[in-house]
Image: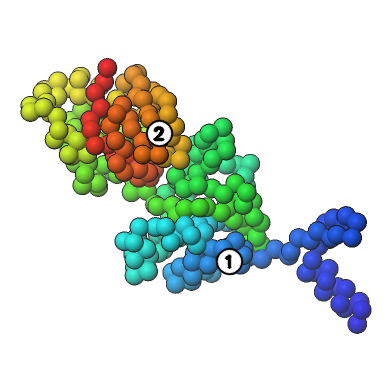
Amino acid sequence: MWCLSFTLIVHTLVIVLVAGHQLLYVKEKVSLVQTAVNEGESVLVTLASQAGLDGILTKPGNLTLFGPTDDAFFELPMEIRQALEDDNQTRIAFLKYHIVNQTIHKSQLKNEATFNTLYGQPIRINFYHNNTVATASGRPIDLGRVDLNATNGVLNVLDGVMLPPTGTMADGCRQAQPLQTLTTLFIESSVIKDVSTLGPLTLFAPTNEAFAKLPKGAIDGLLKNTTALKELMYYHVVLNTYFRAGMETGSLKTLNGNSVNLTVSLDGVKVNGANVISVDETVSNGVIHMLDTVLTPP
């Protein structure tokens, strides 16, 4: 009887340190599903079950789950939360975008590294503020809760829910109703090719209303001067990915060779005085932020 009890204990607990009268134990590894539950991710697990994907997270394999906490789901806009509740295809897309078919440890999380997901679109990793802040597709990574090993992979905890990209930066502009004027100018200037293929990039995108504030005839004049139009378009594009979490007061060099000045405060973000009115639209080759004013190159 004693031998049987001892064997059960050995299989359940592993003694890793004896310090005086204190014992430090590591629990036997469990699947990604149970690991996620243990880390406060019950909403994620419930959605996976509803979507029929819980089997993927329990069967043997070498997966990485970028797992949002319950609080992260509750902070989503109501329309997205409603879509996750009502539409199984939306649930499947969101969940597959959080799963990578390989184990990714903290040592592999490098700035601008990308990892393809079961959804088919990449997760982009970024580090900011002297590597003290890390994001996955713009959502904060809890650096104190990464490399959580499970029997079938690794869990890295997120403090936000990642939104699957709509495609390239060009695709994101085409599909956003507030950016139709910008999309037209991208096409007319041929810059549309660059924002489709180059990267990683950050686009500070003036909305239709921003272009409407320009003097009468300004857009027609640009359409007749493709050199000036290209310079204007390139002035709104910055090399490398700057999600909201990575923005700080300072300057960023644009693709036309000049710089824009960012001012970050409790009131929000300004670019050369223009207000950033919408942030962090993830695209496969970077990120889009919307502006309320068109930037003017020096």
Mark on residue 264?
2
Q: What residue type is labelled 1?
A: Val
Q: Is residue 254 above or below residue 44?
A: above
Which of these two is toward me, 125 or 217?
217
Label 2 packing within 10 angstroms: few (<14), some (14-19), many (20+):
some
Question: Quarter of the image holding residue 190?
Answer: top left
* Left/right of residue 57 with respect to residue 14 in the rendered view: left
Residue 283: in sight, yes or no?
Answer: no
Which of these two is toward me, 273 or 63?
273
Q: Residue at x 91, y 56 (%)?
A: 20
Q: Residue at x 86, y 77 (%)?
A: 5
Q: Is residue 34 above or below residue 199?
A: below
Q: Which residue lies furthest to the front in this view?
A: 266
Which element is circle 2 on?
Answer: strand
Q: Which residue corresponds to mark 1? A: 37
Which of these two is toward me, 203 or 151?
203
Across and down, in percent, residue 166 comes to 33, 49
Across and down, in percent, residue 11 comes to 80, 69
Q: In this view, does 234 lie above or below 75?
A: above
Q: What residue type is labelled 2?
A: Val
